[in-house]
Image (cartoon, helix red, strand yellow):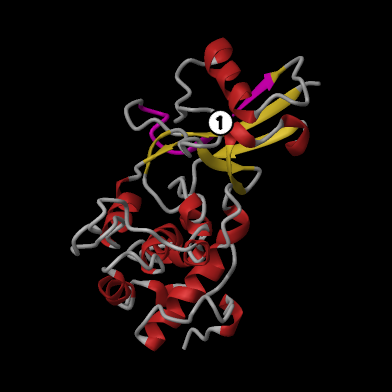
Amino acid sequence: MDVTFRIRRFNPEVPGKNKPYWQEFVLKDVDPTDRVLELLHRIKWEQDGTLTLRRACAHGVCGSDAMRINGVNRLACKVLAKDVGERIQIEPILGLPVLKDLVVDMEPFFAHYRSVMPYFINDTAVPADGRERRQTQEDREKFDDTTKCILCACCTTSCPSFWANGEYVGPAAIVQAHRFIFDTRDEGSKERLGILAEPNGVWRCRTIFNCTPACPRDIQVTRAIGEVKLAIQRGSREGVISEGVGPIAVSNS
């Protein structure tokens, strides 16, 4: 089949192209199982070598090729041509500065990520037998879902609260904090909860639910945010997840 791409372009270094504009490309003999990333490669290699995009593993693991495909945040390496049709619109993800074409400046996103202390904290001595700090399967399951985050920014840049206020820490950072807050081996949960209780922390979430369907790893993002909210209200992570409290049960007030 033939596929027409409508791509939002931007090149700050070239006069006449230093403002966003749309450009169309037609690809012939597209196989329905071709991935959008492969088709963007064809455009770059066969029609316009100046087209700029990020990509790395091409297997949905690195998250580098996040972009808006027909108005939805997705990973280009995971989307098949047959699933988006014969006209495909491509834009950079929203809410972050565009550097060139489909490449955005990820530094504000990673600054929020770093702000929630996304690393294991435990100053107690390693067990006498020299083994790792063990954990039950039940305790592991409390945060297992949020370990799947690949930092693609699809959830954060689908969030209207983030679009409105770039100081909002955003769903991805909260997901990363959740992974450590509910890890029973970690000793930094109270400090993280304090960070997320700040004005630009978790309470800026308005439970719009854009983030969960945007996640290419199917993480229950809004639920994780709700669990963090409840832990802040209680001043502790204890009992939050065992009660099965979902995001709808948590007030934003």
Residue 6: x and y in percent read 63, 32
Q: Residue 98 or 75: which is nearer the viewer? A: 75
Picture quadrant of residue 166: bottom left
Residue at the limit of the structure toward the front, as seen here: 129
Q: Residue 246 or 10: which is nearer the viewer? A: 246
Q: Residue at x 32, y 58 (%)?
A: 133
Q: Residue 206 or 239: which is nearer the viewer? A: 239
Q: Is residue 24 found inside the magenta-colored segment of the image?
A: yes
Location of the N terminus (image quadrant): top right
Q: Residue at x 31, y 65 (%)?
A: 186
Residue at the limit of the structure toward the top, as seen here: 46
Picture quadrant of residue 203: bottom left
Horizontal placement of 64 versus 221: left or right? left
Q: Is residue 33 above or below residue 143?
A: above
- Reading the image, the residue beneath label 1 is 59
Tell me where the magenta segment starts and ends, as one range. 15-26
Q: Residue at x 41, y 64 (%)?
A: 174
Q: Amino acid at mark 1?
A: His
Q: Secondary structure at mark 1?
A: loop
Horizontal placement of 80 versus 92: left or right? right
Q: Is residue 174 above or below residue 92?
A: below
- Dot 1: within a 10 Å radius of its alpha carbon, few (fewer than 14), some, or many (20 or more) residues? few
Q: Is residue 5 found inside the magenta-colored segment of the image?
A: no
Residue 221: x and y in percent read 53, 63
Q: Residue 115 or 102: which is nearer the viewer? A: 115
Horizontal placement of 119 versus 246: left or right? left
Residue 156: x and y in percent read 46, 57
Q: Residue at x 25, y 51 (%)?
A: 130
Residue at the limit of the structure toward the right, as seen here: 1
Picture quadrant of residue 32: top right
Residue 97: x and y in percent read 36, 46
Q: How many marks?
A: 1
